[in-house]
Image (cartoon, rainbow, N blue to C red):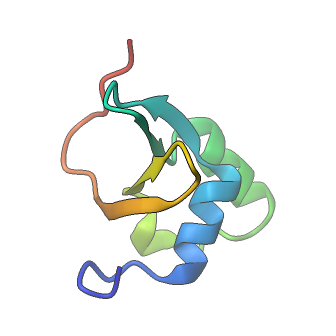
Amino acid sequence: MHQRAISPLAIEALLAYGRGEHDHRGGTIVYFDKTARRRLERDRLDRTLEHCLDAYAVVASTGEIITVGHRDRRIRRH
């Protein structure tokens, strides 16, 4: 998280507000979609997390965070 400049606050918001998509490898990719961004805006957290709105986290089925990063392309949903 530190190397990618993603704060613990951003990860907490991501897990609370983000949308999850299965990665077909046993994990779930959690990211901010349009609905999540609107909810952040409604709760007035969008200004503090402005630089992390393109962040994602890969979460294992046990709830453990595997990795985090910034998206540079769309997440495929099937």
x, y (%) of residue 73?
A: 20, 40
Lateral position of residue 32 relative to residue 16, left or right = left
Relative depth, front residue between 67 and 14 = 67
Relative depth, front residue between 43 and 71 = 71
Relative depth, front residue between 24 and 46 = 24
Quadrant of the rendered image containing residue 69? bottom left
Query: Going 63% across and 45% down the picture, which residue do you hit?
Result: 36
Farthest residue toward the front? Answer: 62
Farthest residue toward the bottom? Answer: 2
Number of callouts: 0
Query: Going 19% across and 50% down the picture, which residue do you hit?
Result: 72
Which image quadrant: the C terminus?
A: top left
Lateral position of residue 72 relative to residue 43, left or right = left
- One can see residue 48 in this view: no
Q: Is residue 12 above or below residue 31?
A: below
Quadrant of the rendered image containing residue 34? top right
Farthest residue toward the left? Answer: 72
x, y (%) of residue 64?
A: 52, 60
- One can see residue 73 in this view: yes
Which image quadrant: the N terminus?
A: bottom left
Query: Going 42% across and 56% down the picture, which residue do you hit?
Result: 57
Q: Is residue 72 above or below residue 25?
A: below
x, y (%) of residue 38?
A: 67, 47
x, y (%) of residue 16?
A: 70, 56
Farthest residue toward the top? Answer: 78
